[in-house]
Image (cartoon, grey):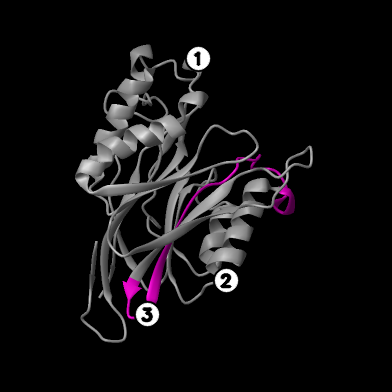
Amino acid sequence: MRLSSRYTSRMAVDLRIASYNVLADAYVKPEWFPRTPSELFVPRRRREALARRIVELDADIVCLQEVEPDSFDALQEALEPHGYMGVLALKQQGKPDGCAVFHRRQRYLGHRAHYFGDRLENGRISGHLALVMDFDAGGGERLRVACTHLRWDRPDKPVEQHQGMQEATELLQELVQGDPEALWVVCGDFNAEPGEPLVRAFAAAGLVDAYEGRHQPTCNANDRAKAIDFLFHSRALRAQPDRLPELDDRTPLPSETEPSDHLPISARLLRD
């Protein structure tokens, strides 16, 4: 990550950021992945493959979803020699996984876990969260990175009742719009596709989709490839997104080269 002092009033920014749903072991059911050889689901083997895939991204900040404690420990051990330190925040309500962020140790200020207030059908809070990391962007500015995994809900559900939309609205109103002076990056598994109201809400809040106009499928679930992973950023930044491997309805995920049922997305973010 480069944050250089070309100006006294603000700093130049040049960093690489990635987002990746790594597929929790608890959610692996072989019948859901009929094209994937069973040996690829062995936890130790898959964690080693995930670590290699993350290192290949060469990102300064890596935002992960569906991370379990054992996977986090394994990734932290594997990534530390490459200069990364990590933070994990687990979902509530007995969920086995959460969000984690690994970053190279530059200008890190701290983090917080924001748990959403949306409720399940039984009245309990869902337990989903956004893990927010703070970095010093120089010149008195902060770079704030929110990693999240928004809850899936039926696409045909009314917007005002859609739980993912409720979480997205809370994230935007209470976090992003609550700190408009910061440089923001919001990324993760949104469980929604380009053009859906949930995704449009981020643009309406003033953020920019790093992959706008060049979306490719990021996940193949139930033999339907779709783009549901996103990386949004403040308008003060400009993105150079990385091209993804080709993915269609017949592409097996996980595979020998892709250890999750999602592809990682990544981009270079700059401000001159």
Residue on which disc 1 sits: 31
Q: Amino acid at mark 2?
A: Gly
Query: Could you tell whether 267 is left or right of 188 in the image?
Result: left
Helix, strand or loop under label 1: helix
The span from disc 1 to disc 2 (Cα, nearest Å) is 44 Å
Indicate the quadrant where residue 52 lies: top left
**In the rendered structure, which segment of residues is drawn in magenta?**
137-161
Helix, strand or loop under label 3: loop
Q: Please, is residue 87 above or below residue 251 in the view? A: below
149 or 34, which lies in front? 149
Task: Name the image quarter holding the N terminus.
Answer: bottom left
**How many other residues sit within 10 Å of disc 3, few (<14), some (14-19) or many (≥20)?**
few
**How many other residues sit within 10 Å of disc 1, few (<14), some (14-19) or many (≥20)?**
few
- Circle number at residue 178: 2
Work out whether mark 3 precedes mark 1 in sequence or the reverse, and give the earlier one: 1
Q: Please, is residue 121 above or below residue 186 in the view? A: above
Work out whether mark 1 precedes mark 2 in sequence or the reverse, and give the earlier one: 1
Task: Name the image quarter holding the C terminus.
Answer: bottom left
Residue 147, magenta (yes or no): yes
Does residue 160 appear in the picture of this structure?
Answer: yes
Measuring from the top left, give residue 214's x and y in whole percent.
Answer: 36, 52
234 or 77, which lies in front? 77
Q: Amino acid at mark 1?
A: Glu
Q: Residue at x 37, y 80 (%)?
A: 140
Measuring from the top left, give residue 180's x and y in whole percent.
Answer: 51, 75
**How many other residues sit within 10 Å of disc 2, few (<14), some (14-19) or many (≥20)?**
few
Q: Residue at x 79, y 42 (%)?
A: 123
Measuring from the top left, give residue 190's x and y in whole percent.
Answer: 52, 47
Query: Could you tell whether 86 is left or right of 173 in the image?
Result: left
The span from disc 3 to disc 1 (Cα, nearest Å) is 52 Å
Residue on which disc 3 sits: 140
Work out whether mark 3 precedes mark 2 in sequence or the reverse, and give the earlier one: 3
